Amino acid sequence: MDTVILANFIGSKIAFTGVEDSEAHITAFHTQVMVLGGTGAMHYKLFMSTFSGTTLDWFVSLPNGHITSFDQFSTLFREQFIVNQAPPSYLLRSL
């Protein structure tokens, strides 16, 4: 949380409200931040800025100091919103 984000840094333009595919959101977010020159430490601060609605409520409910890395954060996010993930393509072909 101590990482400073420069005022002229343009963050991610995507939003997650809790109904979208969480895996697709992480992929799109990661791609945008890396293209914009974001560092690993910036991922955490910028990722939470994409939340709104029930996703923001979930994030605010996490205990302070609970998250120690972006990998842990993205894992918690995936687990929380797993029901929104699109099924793997191999499952769609068998339907």
Image (tube, rainbow, N blue to C red):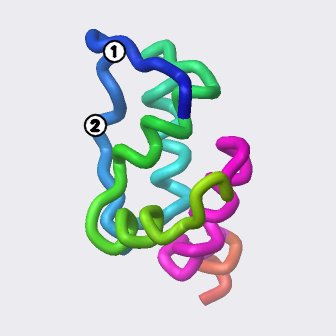
Q: Does residue 8 appear left or right of residue 75 in this picture?
A: left
Which quadrant does the N terminus fall into?
top right
- Numbered disc 1: secondary structure: loop
Tell me which residue sits at (60%, 89%) in the image. Answer: 95
Q: Residue at x 58, y 20 (%)?
A: 39
Give the overall secondary structure of the magenta segment.
helix
Q: Amino acid at mark 2?
A: Lys
50 with respect to 42 (left or right): left
Please tell me in which quadrant of the rendered image residue 79 appears.
bottom right
What element does badge 2 sit on? loop
- Where are the magenta residues, as a range? 67-89
Residue 74 placement (x, y as % from top left): 63, 53
Q: Which residue is mark 1?
A: 9
| Residue 89, x across and y down, in percent | 63, 68
Residue at x-position 46% and y-position 18%? 4
Q: Nearer the viewer, residue 85 or 66?
A: 66
**Residue 77 magenta:** yes
Where does the image place residue 82, in percent across and percent down from the top left?
Answer: 58, 75
The residue pinned by badge 2 equals: 13
